[in-house]
Each structure stands twice: as C-alpha cells, then as structure tokens.
C-alpha cells in the first residue's frame, strides 16, 4: 500500500502541467495543495485503520444478511412443512368425511329397506286382522240370521200351533215343558 502512495505523487508530478513549464510543486498551485491534503487524508484513514473497520462493518453486514437469509430459508422450509402437514390433514379429513357420507348413505339405504320390510309386515298384519274381523262379522251375521230364523220359526210355529191346538192342549204342553226343563236343570 505504501508503494502505491509513493507512486501516486510521482505519477502526478509527470503531469501535463509540468510539461508546460509551470511549477507544480508549489504551495501557490492549488492542485498541489489539494493533492497533499488528499494524501494526508488517505494517510490518516490508513493510520486509524478505517479501511479495516469499513471492511469489518461490511463483513458484519454481509454476515447479518447471510444469517437473515438463512433464517428466512429456515422459516420458508418450516412454512412449507406446515403447509404440507395441513394439506395431509385436509386430505385425511376429506377422506374421513367421504367415509362418513358413504356410511350415512349406506345406513339410510338399510333404514329404508328396513322401513319397507316393516311396512310390508304391518300391512300383512292389518290384512290378517281385517280378514279375521270380516270372518268374525260374517259368523256373527250368520248367527244373527239363524237366531232370527229360529225366532221367526218359533213365532210361526206358535201361531200355527195356537190355531191348531186348543187351550187345554196348550196348557198341558206348557206344563210338560216346564217339567222337562225342571228335570234337566236339576
């Protein structure tokens, strides 16, 4: 670095201003004074290690940026992992929901079939009960008709007998019937 500092003033002394005959190395020459001030400034910067500090600061900033990038990558990887996990969970939940719907559909079909069977059984039972009621009503009607026929026959027989029997014969028949009924009851 020091060699460069020495080469720089020499290169400046071989400037076109010297070739023209003007004296460059003079405090009256503002270019020379600015050059000296600049060189002193550079020397002070080098003496206090400003380039090293700047380099250290830049290295520190690069390391901070690198660590932030690493952290961002880690966060991105974690987010992708979480996303994949949630997608798997969503897929599992969707499959479970599909199974629940399928089971519900199957259960509804089974319930409908059972309801059909129950209705058919109920209809058969009601038909049997109705047939029994019809048979019972028919038997009752036949009994009523027979009873009525018996009553009508008895009335007709009584009337015929009362016309043909005398009162004395009727009284004997009644007495005989009472005796017969009395004997059968005891």
Image: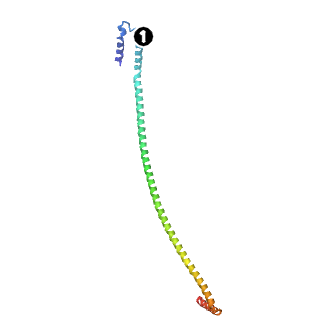
Of 76 and 143, the residue lying toward us: 143
> Dot 1: within a 10 Å radius of its alpha carbon, few (fewer than 14), some, or many (20 or more) residues?
few
What residue occupies the far right of the structure in this picture? 167
Asked if 113 appears above or below 7 in the picture, the reply is below
Asked if 59 appears above or below 42 in the picture, the reply is below
The image shows residue 163 at horizontal and vertical percentages of: 63, 89
Locate the C terminus and report the quarter of the image it occupies.
Answer: bottom right
User: Residue drawn at (50%, 69%), measured in percent from left and top?
Assistant: 127
Classify residue 104 as left or right of residue 4: right
What residue occupies the far top of the structure in this picture? 21
User: Residue drawn at (44%, 52%), measured in percent from left and top?
Assistant: 98
The image shows residue 28 at horizontal and vertical percentages of: 42, 8
| Residue 26 falls in image quadrant | top left
Locate the N terminus and report the quarter of the image it occupies.
Answer: top left
| Residue 159 falls in image quadrant | bottom right
The image shows residue 9 at horizontal and vertical percentages of: 36, 13
Q: Classify mark 1: helix, strand or loop.
A: helix
The image shows residue 122 at horizontal and vertical percentages of: 50, 67
| Residue 142 falls in image quadrant | bottom right
Asked if 74 appears above or below 141 in the picture, the reply is above
User: Residue drawn at (42%, 38%), measured in percent from left and top?
Assistant: 76
**Would you name the residue on which mark 1 appears?**
30
User: Residue drawn at (55%, 75%), measured in percent from left and top?
Assistant: 137
Asked if 106 appears above or below 35 in the picture, the reply is below
């Amino acid at each position: 670095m020091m060699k460069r500092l020495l080469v720089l003033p020499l290169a400046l002394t071989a400037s076109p201003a010297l070739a023209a005959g003007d004296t460059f190395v003079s405090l009256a020459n503002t270019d020379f004074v600015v050059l000296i001030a600049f060189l002193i400034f550079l020397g002070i910067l080098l003496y206090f290690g400003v380039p090293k500090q700047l380099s250290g600061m830049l290295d520190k900033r690069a390391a901070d940026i690198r660590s932030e990038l690493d952290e961002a990558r880690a966060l991105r990887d974690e987010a992708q992992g979480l996303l994949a996990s949630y997608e798997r969970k969503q897929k599992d939940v969707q499959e479970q929901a599909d199974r629940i719907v399928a089971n519900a559909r199957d259960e509804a079909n089974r319930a409908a079939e059972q309801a059909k069977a129950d209705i058919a059984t109920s209809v058969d039972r009601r038909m049997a009960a109705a047939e029994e009621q019809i048979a019972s009503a028919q038997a009752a009607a036949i009994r009523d008709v027979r009873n009525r026929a018996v009553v009508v026959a008895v009335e007709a027989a009584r009337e015929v007998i009362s016309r043909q029997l005398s009162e004395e014969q009727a009284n004997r028949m009644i007495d005989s019937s009472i005796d017969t009924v009395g004997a059968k009851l005891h």
